[in-house]
Amino acid sequence: MANVTREDFSVAAATNASAYRRVTIPVLRIEAGPGPAVALIAGVHGDEWEGQAAILDLWQQLPEILQRGTVYLLPAVNAEASLAGTRLSPSDGGNLNRAFLGEPARGYTESIAAALEARLLPRVQAMVDVHSGGASLRYLPSSVITRYGNDAYDERLPALARAFGLPDCVFFRGGEAGSMPAAASRHGVLRLSAEIGGGRETSQSLADSCRDGLLGCLAELGLLSRPESAHPAQDAQVRLYDLDTPAATLRARESGVFVPAVELGQSVAAQQPIGRLIEPARPNVPPRPLLSPQAGTVVCLRPIARSDDGDCLLQVAPALPLDSLASRY
């Protein structure tokens, strides 16, 4: 039986109605003897539910099955945003995935980031940070590999992505010094992420897929035995999508109602019609056709019909073998 302790911390979250308000961030530490230390994190954005549900399941299950090492569970790392069901922190409008800016922390969101840098990241060797499309996007359920800056390629990443068990993997490049990938990079922490679902909803199947993916990563990192149901030969067929290229994202160039004509996971050709923008309140405005920016698979789709200039409507990229990741770094 693993040793289980609560390591919650609280940060100031003042509002106009509550000068000395504090918000508690729940943290569970599960220790099962010598081995790596791993953090499993969700709720960086409060309206991204799949990872939060999955880690809450592990909060109950993992103490009984962890075989070695230490796991930190943070099911709602931005607790205020989770309680409000919002992407950004209600008290200060902060984006926790851009708040790792060092001391002194300015407000609630930066205080969470500062606490994670001081209390958590120096104590772990790896982390899995689960996201989704939140209220404004839906993603094809995918593991995510993000390269921060000029970080060297880590040969462990493809195996970790395969261990997550999903057939799709998204690749981003990041340069923001305040991001979670930047913070992990500063501390030499191996990091995998995920984009699972979205649209201000969730389902048991998505939460279960996320939970199983997290367990697969713990097995890959040596904290659990690999499940007998795992099929490495099948897991090897992971498709990689590079969403960092400019051609991968279609943004609205004007306001209107987005009527998509494609679905997540659908294959499209370059310049294929993928939907239209309409303005029902102004029937004299003709529909504006929207074309796919490149050939590939629809990986991300906006579920909110009313859209404005600059909104992401769709992301599409060709499927590549996961083994091509090294050449794209």
Image (tube, rainbow, N blue to C red):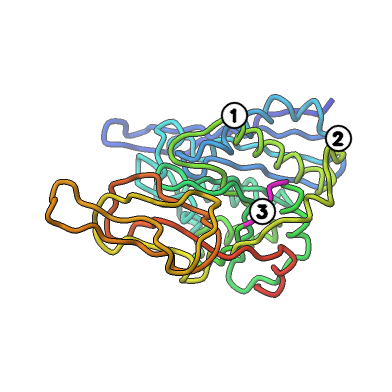
Looking at the rendered structure, the kind of residue marked 1 is Gln
Q: Give me the C-alpha separation between circle 1 and circle 2.
A: 26 Å
Describe the element under mark 1 as helix, strand or loop.
Answer: helix
- Disc number at residue 35? none
Residue 280 place in picture, x, y as percent? 18, 47
Residue named by callout 3: 192
Looking at the rendered structure, the kind of residue marked 2 is Gln
Examine the image and state in which quarter residue 199 appears.
Answer: top left
* Left or right position of 189 against 231: left
Q: Which residue is drawn at 71% across and 48% down?
A: 123
Q: Give the class, few, some or many, for how many residues have Cα within 10 Å of label 3's Cα (few <14, many ≥20).
A: many
Q: Give me the C-alpha separation between circle 3 and circle 1.
A: 22 Å
Q: In which quarter of the image is the N terminus?
A: top right
Q: Give the class, few, some or many, for how many residues have Cα within 10 Å of label 1's Cα (few <14, many ≥20).
A: few
Q: In which quarter of the image is the C terminus?
A: bottom right
What is the chief secondary structure element of the magenta stretch? loop
Residue situated in front as seen by the camera: 291 or 30: 291
Q: In this view, does 88 lie above or below 293?
A: above
Residue 245 place in picture, x, y as percent? 51, 71
Q: What stretch is highlighted in magenta?
A: 165-169
- Disc number at residue 67? 2
Image depth: mark 1 or mark 2 in front:
1
Residue 53 place in picture, x, y as percent? 58, 31
Residue 178 place in picture, x, y as percent? 49, 60
Any magenta on residue 37? no
Q: In this view, does 326 lie above or below 210?
A: below
- Disc number at residue 204? 1
Looking at the rendered structure, the kind of residue marked 3 is Leu
Asked whether disc 2 touches disc 3, contact meaning CB atoms under 8 Å apart, the reply is: no
* Residue 88 visible in the current orientation: no
Describe the element under mark 3 as helix, strand or loop.
Answer: strand
